[in-house]
Amino acid sequence: MSVGWANLPILPLRCILEHLSANDALAATSTCQHWRSAIQLYEGRKDVIKLSVKNIEKSMFLTRIFKKYTKHLHIYIDTTVVEELVSFMNYILPLYFETINLNELAFLGPSYILKNPNVPIPQLQRIIVETLVFKNLHSLQRLLLTGCEMATPKNENDRYVHKNVEYYSRPLTFSTKRCLDDTILSRSNVGLMMFSKLQSIVIDYEYLSSATVNTLSRLPALSLLTLNIGHKRPLSLPRFEWPPETLNVAINVIAVPLHRFNDIIEHVFVRGLLLVSLKVMFCKTFHVPLLSHLSRLYKSTLQEFVWVDAPCMSTTPFYRVVKPEPYDVCVNHILLMCWQCVQLRRLVIHGYWLWQYDVLGIVRLRSSLERLELSAVYSQQNHFGTGDNRILRVLANDDLDILEAQYIEKINEHTQFKWAPTTYEALPPALKLNATSKDRADYYMRETSI
């Protein structure tokens, strides 16, 4: 009998297929019945599963194979059709009550995926989602509700959509009246989560209120509240006065145009905020006044700073210089911020040029850095003919410089880690030319999980 791929013993074949990505494993199941049996018999083991609400058939197939050992469940609500979301919530999400060790549950709404600020906000079925959180108290560490909200149940019918939901929701109570206390998790159920391992919750800024913070503060392990600011209604954000000794806060600013930054500085970055992380993604600009504001208010708390964009699609030098600010630019403002923020541990800048000796100044002045990610570093100060320290965009036709080994060694003399600039090939797809909405959504999910 001939021996080939089609008749390998199932166990060694399963060990080989285990190294495939979820999409590749899905394709492998279509090869032949023998390969399909190898994956299904031993159940798939993929840490991260990404499900599309719009493509419910594929999501169901992935769920049946990988649900038991999934650790990070990412749900992309890539549709505005209410019926499709309801079907997903009723038929697919309850199957994850069989997951053994779920660490992360993430929902990403259509306003971030479709880049349309006017799409309706999807309503998640509170009873199902909150019961899933409750069932995984022993393992769930991160909950992300981005571009979506928890709906107020009209009745108790959602308890009976699946036997697992009915069983695990028995100790939980849900109010049929809308209340600020229940914006994220029901206040009546937080008392049952005293042994929860939930450490991080991500929500949109517009759902922030004193009642919400008070409810979440009752979770014993919660140490980080992440707030997302996207380009959607309302365009003007309310000002929130933070109570003393509150949670550590991270802020993600996603695809927001330049004209909104001053409003964000005034209403979001206020005194009393314990800001530990700021990530600005896909805004197509660099707002220098925000750096100065961070240095004044959060120099003793800020630990992480990320500002990333894909290269500008234009090749015209006019678009290289970020809009000049009406004050002195004799010192690079990124360097100045790094010097003043004494707790800074992670610095990531992609899509903007930095002079190599500004980078050297950063590592000399900020010895606390543990991670430094830069992709565009130039060697000659007048390389672009600007003659000053303005922020410069990476354009579509730019070639990333290859730095001298001697210079990289000099950088590493001042770091606790081995540093080298990120090559264009090593950049995530979202930070390259012609990035898709899905690429950007994947990068957002990746950054939120760090």
Image: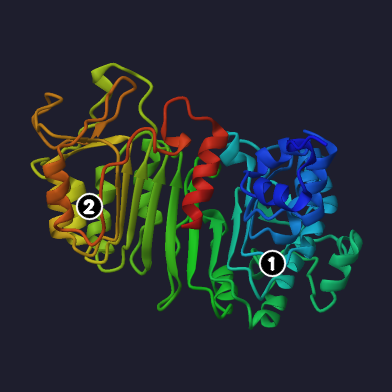
Task: Decide which of 98, 118 is in the foreground and name it.
Answer: 98
- Can you identify the residue that label 1 sits on? 179
- Examine the rendering and report whether any part of residue 254 can be seen: yes
Q: Position of residue 37 (x, y in %)?
A: 83, 46
| Residue farthest along the top direction in this orientation | 316
The answer to whether 1 is drawn above or below residue 342 in the figure is above
- Tell me, for residue 143, which label it has, or none: none
Lateral position of residue 378 relative to residue 18, left or right:
left
Instruction: Check the picture and name the quadrant holding the N terminus.
Output: top right
Q: CA distance from mark 1 to mark 2?
A: 38 Å
Instruction: Write the residue at 76% across / 68% down.
Output: 131
Instruction: Write the residue at 40% across / 56% down.
Output: 268
Label 2 neighbour load within 10 Å: few <14, some 14-19, many 20+: some
- Amino acid identity at mark 1: Cys
The answer to whether 177 is drawn above or below residue 384 in the figure is below
Task: Decide which of 117, 131 is in the foreground and name it.
Answer: 131
Task: Decide which of 122, 20 is in the foreground and name it.
Answer: 20
Lateral position of residue 422 relative to residue 146, left or right:
left
Instruction: Write the residue at 56% across / 75% down.
Output: 214
- Tell me, for residue 292, which label it has, or none: 2
Question: Looking at the image, is mark 1 or mark 2 earlier in the sequence?
Answer: 1
Q: Position of residue 171 (x, y in %)?
A: 81, 79
Instruction: Write the residue at 27% across / 62% down.
Output: 344
Lateral position of residue 27 relative to residue 251, left or right:
right
Q: Position of residue 196 (x, y in %)?
A: 63, 77
- Examine the rendering and report whether any part of residue 75 can be seen: no
Q: Position of residue 185 (x, y in %)?
A: 67, 68
- Amino acid identity at mark 2: Ser
Image mark count: 2
Q: Secondary structure at mark 1?
A: loop
